[in-house]
Image: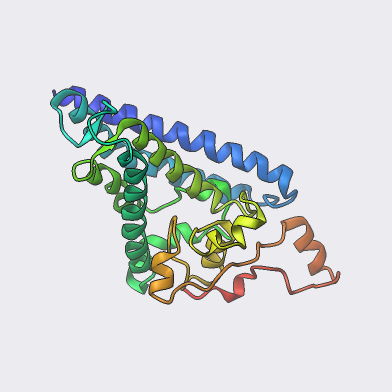
Amino acid sequence: MILAVLLSALAMSAIVAVRYAITSGLFAWLTERRVPGRLAGQGPQIRREIGWSLASAAIYGIPAGVVAWGWQNRGWTRIYADVHAFPLWWMPVSVLAYLFAHDTWFYWTHRLMHRPWWFKRMHSVHHDSRPPTAWAAMSFHPWEALTGAVVIPALVFLVPIHVTMLGLVLTVMTVMGVTNHMGWEMFPRAIVHGPLGKWLITASHHELHHQKYRCNYGLYFRVWDRLCATDQGLGAFALPRARHAAAGRGGPGAGAAVGERGGAAR
């Protein structure tokens, strides 16, 4: 039994690592084509992001692997495979319930991580990415990674969810984590600047968090930021390194690069 649980945890850690590598790699590749120069000169930072992220993948995989083993072999959790076990309307509702619960946990732990003691010892690892890249989605100190790793495994014991809807939740979690750090908007302007964008977190919303630090703490939704007056709207993306360097040599707008680091308040 112990060996089986250990193998499940190792397998899940490998799956999380591969999922991270594929998703971050894809959006990093798209970034090079969408915003040429965005990643220029960031090789050391990207290697550091990948290193921390692979460590985080192991941490995320351990509880997920234990829970997966328990679900398949002991009937643990409230994950179900029979679509008729609950009303069909519950399937999309369960996805929203998981995302909102995760967002709530993330918002309050994220705010805690910005308290000086916690920031210095944990969260500064994530904010060492300046500007963040698609590889930074899981670039966390191990203790911070642990706070994120327990959320979904805990929820499956409390809230019923179909196995395919759980897969959708994990997909949204991965894609949003990557795209919110990549330095350009995946969503069309009509969404970002429209009514829906007032409630959804997009890349430009999270970009402002990485510039100002003390705002925009949410993960998927802007609900808690708006309720707690920590929502400062959308930010503008940092200039690609090549153009930033040209501006620094005296070109138009020198010293006015969007997302200047000097505004970050630790």
* Foreground pick, 207 / 142: 207
Residue 48 visible within the image: no
Instruction: Tell me residue 265's x, y (percent).
Output: 50, 76
User: In the rendered view, how is the structure colored?
Assistant: rainbow
User: In the image, what residue occupies the spot 32% across and 62% down?
Assistant: 109
> Left or right: 16 with respect to 208?
left
Q: Where does the image place residue 38, in percent across and percent down from the top left?
A: 69, 52
Q: Taking 218 as reference, is 63 above or below it? A: above
Compared with 266, 138 (above or below) is above
- Using the rendered image of the protein, determine whether residue 183 is visible from the camera's viewpoint: yes
**Is 248 situated above or below 39?**
below
At 53% from the left and 37% from the top, the residue drawn is: 23
Q: What residue is drawn where x is 17% and y is 23%?
A: 73
Viewer-proximal residue among 34 and 77: 77
Q: Residue 147, percent across and down?
A: 30, 53
For the image, the number of numbered tags is 0
Determine the image quadrant of residue 29. top right
With 188 as the anchor, is 118 left or right in this view?
A: left
**Residue at x 44% of width, y 63% of height:** 124
The single residue placed furthest to the right in the displayed view is 251
Q: In this rendering, would 58 be left or right of 67?
A: right
Where's residue 191, x and y in %?
60, 56
For the N terminus, the quadrant is top left
Q: Quadrant of residue 76?
A: top left
